[in-house]
Amino acid sequence: MFNTEFRTLRFSAVVTLALLILGSGNATAQDMNSLHGRLSPMPVTAATVKTITGQGQVTARLNGTTLTIEGNFEGMNSPATMAHIHMGPKAVPGPVILRLDVSAGTSGTISGNLTLSPEQVRALHAESLYVQIHSESNPEGELRGWLTH
């Protein structure tokens, strides 16, 4: 009888430990799928240093391969004309990979529901994707922010 109770107790302990480990793995995966970014002035050339203003923030949530972006910005020198997600490591400009919706004003919102390729998902987790807002007076880009965990 003692041997049976011990095996039952040991089995329960193993199951509980396995559930705890699996549960913490899901929390880590969920954290990896929630990102944010601070949008700040990023002059592309020396000539634009004096004309770039504003700030903002974005949040990003990855569900499978669907990335949902939401955010806002304010204080830009001229109205926003477009917004994109670019691929490039921190502080290194990269190519446009996806287009976002953005308000046409000096303040407003930015959003998008985007389908990422496997390469883009890896870049997102490596914090190598950034949001950039372009404006009338700074068509090469006014605000930029990397998506980080």
Image: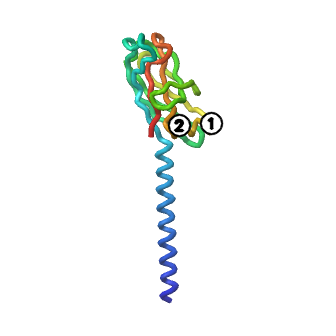
Badge 1 marks a residue whose secondary structure is loop
Residue drawn at (42%, 21%), measured in percent from left and top? 42
Q: Is residue 7 visible?
A: yes
As drawn, 107 above or below 26: above
Residue drawn at (47%, 66%), measured in percent from left and top? 17
Q: Nearer the viewer, residue 96 or 134?
A: 96
Residue 82 appears at what percent x and percent y?
52, 18
Residue bearing the label numbered 2: 124
Q: How is the image coloured?
A: rainbow
Query: What residue type is disc 2 on?
Result: Leu
Query: What residue type is disc 1 on?
Result: Ser
Q: Does residue 13 appear left or right of residue 119 in this picture?
A: left
Residue drawn at (45%, 10%), measured in percent from left and top? 137
Q: Nearer the viewer, residue 125 or 53?
A: 125
Residue 50 appears at what percent x and percent y?
37, 12
Residue bearing the label numbered 1: 117
